[in-house]
Image (tube, grey):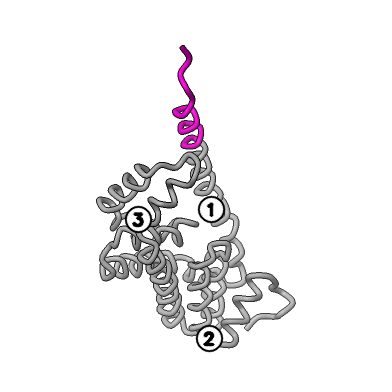
Amino acid sequence: MFVAEELTGIAGWAVDLMEALGAPGAGLAVALENLFPPIPSEIILPLAGLAASRGDLNLIEVLVWTTVGSLTGAIILYSLGRLLGADRLRAFARRVPLLEVRDIDRTEAWFSKHGAKAVFFGRMLPVFRSLISIPAGVTKLHIGVFAGLTFAGSAIWNTIFVLAGFFLGENWTLIEPYADAFQIIVIGLVVVVLGWWVVTRIRAGRPTEA
């Protein structure tokens, strides 16, 4: 499928899985990416598309297996959220500086209202793609709704990157700079929001001067 010397690290690991298991190997790699966000699907998916363009894998099987892999990883995290539950999160919030029980209550209320949209669109955002499954489980979003929205959102994301690798062929690495920039933007926004939240909470906790 690939020359071993050409690919190392995560890319080489993903290729080894695909060479050993075929399209299910791509699905397994994507499932693990959901559980461990540092593994980038933006590398795994185009590589699977490249393999399909060479005839080493079947394109339809790749699309199906990678989406099944996304759903499998998401359901594991959803189950973790259900096991954790809102009560445990509230108990955790009482022990963590700057966190308050009302933060959990507000998050739960927001997710109960907008959870379906968050799950669907969250599947197309780096980092959130994995983490969004946990609050869905905590708030007990219906498993059928969760699975359907996760499958749909994952299918769109996976298809974009698999087809990019399929049509770009050996130039699949052209995708990386754009995917990396998108991920940096998302992470940067998260850092800014968290920083603003921490500063606001610290200021709110300061005693007022007489």
- Disc 2 versus disc 3: distance between alpha carbons? 43 Å
Foreground: disc 3 or disc 1: 3
Q: Quadrant of residue 17?
A: bottom right
- Amino acid found under the numbered disc labelled 2: Gly
At a point 69% along the width and 73% down the height, the residue shown is 7
> Which residue is identified by label 1?
183
> Which residue is identified by label 3?
87
* One can see residue 210 in this view: yes
| Secondary structure found at label 1 | helix
Foreground residue among 165 and 206: 206
* One can see residue 159 in this view: no
| Secondary structure found at label 3 | helix
Residue 199 versus residue 210 in the image, above or below: below
Q: Quadrant of residue 44?
A: bottom right
Q: Position of residue 152 (x, y in %)?
A: 33, 67
> Which residue is identified by label 2?
22
Q: Which residues are magenta?
A: 196-210
At a point 48% along the width and 78% down the height, the residue shown is 27
Residue 163 appears left or right of 149: right
At a point 59% along the width and 60% down the height, the residue shown is 176
Foreground: disc 2 or disc 3: 3
Q: Which numbered disc flags the more N-terminal residue, 3 or 1? A: 3
- Amino acid found under the numbered disc labelled 3: Asp
| Secondary structure found at label 2 | loop
Foreground residue among 51 and 74: 74
